[in-house]
Amino acid sequence: MNYEQARFNMIEQQIRPWEVLDSQVLSLLAVVRREDFVPAARKAMAFADMEIALTAKPGQAMLAPKVEARMLQDLAVQKHEKVLEIGTGSGYMAALLAHRAQQVITLEIDAALAEVARDNLEKAGIYNAEVRTGDGAAKLGQAVSSSDPLSGPFDVIVLSGSVAEVPPALQAMLKVGGRLSAIVGFEPMMRATLVTRVGETAFRTTQGWDTVAPRLLNFPEPSRFSF
């Protein structure tokens, strides 16, 4: 398989048509080798317009390339910024974020998958992304001490999976000016949601595009119905 041609086709045929036009994002997708973050048995699907299962467990998957790219574009991560990701998976999104940020802390609930991500990031020569094993939903605001990087605050928070709603505890971990990206809602259609902290107690929420993504584990699931 010609990976370079497949990567070019992914960018030009999937990602550009999905309104990802930021030249820095497109250049990054050309540099970070997505195939190196895909399980060996599924490497031929690395550039397909689909989620790629990472384990036999339901929901543990790499998001589709166009979804990762558009989230990255929405966040406009800067070189001085500190990023928290929940849902490391194979480490691919953490790799993209690390190229743009000063520091990335990424949480993965599955210990075996977290170890795979560490190995993938090391092989890719990325050393400003730290993979931690843990339940992102349970660890919110539960850092061991104020010196623990997980205590925040963060310039950017990324949920690499979907949630029914954005927990207020996550929004509280943003710096003023910080942004949080999540896929919010229920199947069959969810909304890509960008929350920006515009003041000490003020947040602005925009929803720019529709998609569907696997659930992140253990986040609250409020009822879809009201009476």
Image (cartoon, rainbow, N blue to C red):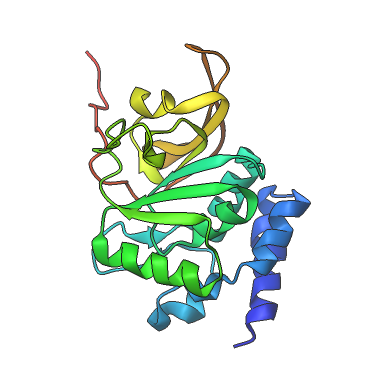
**Is 220 rendered above or below residue 63?**
above
Q: Residue furthest bottom?
A: 1
Task: Give the image location of residue 221, x and y in percent.
Answer: 24, 33
Tell me what residue is drawn at x 27 percent, y 53 percent.
Answer: 109
Q: Do we see residue 53 in this rendering? A: no
Task: Give the image location of residue 43, x and y in percent.
Answer: 47, 79
Q: Residue furthest front?
A: 147
**Is 181 rendered above or below residue 206?**
below
**Quarter where residue 74 is shown:** top right
- The answer to whether 17 appears left or right of 222 in the picture is right
**Is 60 rendered above or below residue 78?**
below
**Quarter where residue 110 is shown:** bottom left
Tell me what residue is drawn at x 36 percent, y 23 percent.
Answer: 168
Q: Nearer the viewer, residue 64 or 35?
A: 35
- The answer to whether 204 appears left or right of 183 in the picture is right
**Quarter where residue 38 is shown:** bottom left
Looking at the rendering, in which quadrant would you find the N terminus?
bottom right
Q: Do we see residue 25 in this rendering? A: yes
Tell me what residue is drawn at x 48 percent, y 63 percent.
Answer: 50
